[in-house]
Image (cartoon, rainbow, N blue to C red):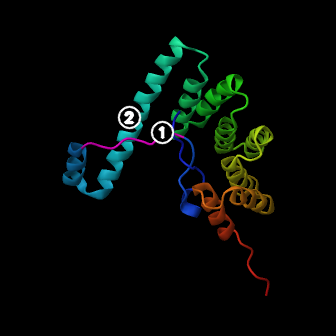
Amino acid sequence: MVTKKILIGFAAAGIIAVAGFTGCSKSKDAKDAAQTAGGPGQEAALQGQAALVSNAVIVEDLKARLKEKPNDPEVLWRLGDAYFESKQFADATEYYKKAIQYKPDETDIYNDLGLSVHYLGKSEEGLKYIEQGIKKNPYHQRIWLTKGFILAYGVGDLQGAKTAWEKAAALNPESQIGKAATEFLVQFKEKPKK
């Protein structure tokens, strides 16, 4: 199974966003060319292009596998992840929905689907998938973190977000996800009244 990144926090909390592949490293030749052509800014641009090319290769490989086994939930899920990594959230949503048909008890897919739908600007709908996932497994730490993220950034419900992050942190405070939840709680801590 594909290793997932902890997703969520983007610039605000400095936490890497969700689901997907671990990425690819760029070759020494590309790095040397970037430094010669314009320094670190150019290198970052080349790195981004390399990641897009790599992800396109991954998508094509997964689509080829899907032709052989059209109902393979792992391939459907991984294809959703690849599209998510490319910020193609509509395509990611499509494949996550297909994967859920074959793995209806897999909480991680509900998490990924809910987040993709949120990024399409449909936070309320995304929360419905998150809630379905929570019903499948109320002890799944990542889905509580995601719920808090969508509540805070998509719906503007800071109290609901805090409750979700408290739940995520309480499930395992020492895990990466627990620490991320604590970061969010610190970030949104109520300011004292004057």
What secondary structure is found at the residue carrying circle 2?
Answer: helix
Between residue 32 and residue 38, name the one nearer to us. 32
- The residue at 80%/58% (across/down) is 160
Which contiguous range is marked in magenta? 20-27
Residue 53: image tag = 2
Q: Looking at numbered disc 1 in the image, what kind of residue is underneath it? A: Phe
Determine the CA span between mark 1 and mark 2: 13 Å
- The residue at 73%/46% (across/down) is 123
Residue extending furthest top? 68
Q: Mark 1 points at which residue?
A: 21
What secondary structure is found at the residue carrying circle 1?
Answer: loop
Badge 1 density bin: few <14, some 14–19, many ≥20, Cα 10 Å? some
Q: In this view, does 174 lie above or below 103?
A: below
The answer to if 84 sits in the magenta stretch is no
Please identify the quarter of the rendering in which residue 101 is found: top right
The answer to if 23 sits in the magenta stretch is yes
The answer to whether residue 177 is left or right of residue 55 is: right
Mark found first going from the N terminus, 1 or 2: 1
Which secondary structure class fits the magenta region best?
loop
Instruction: Name the spot of residue 161 as percent of width and height, x first.
Output: 75, 58
Please identify the quarter of the rendering in which residue 60 is found: top left
Instruction: Name the spot of residue 152 as percent of width and height, x first.
Output: 72, 58
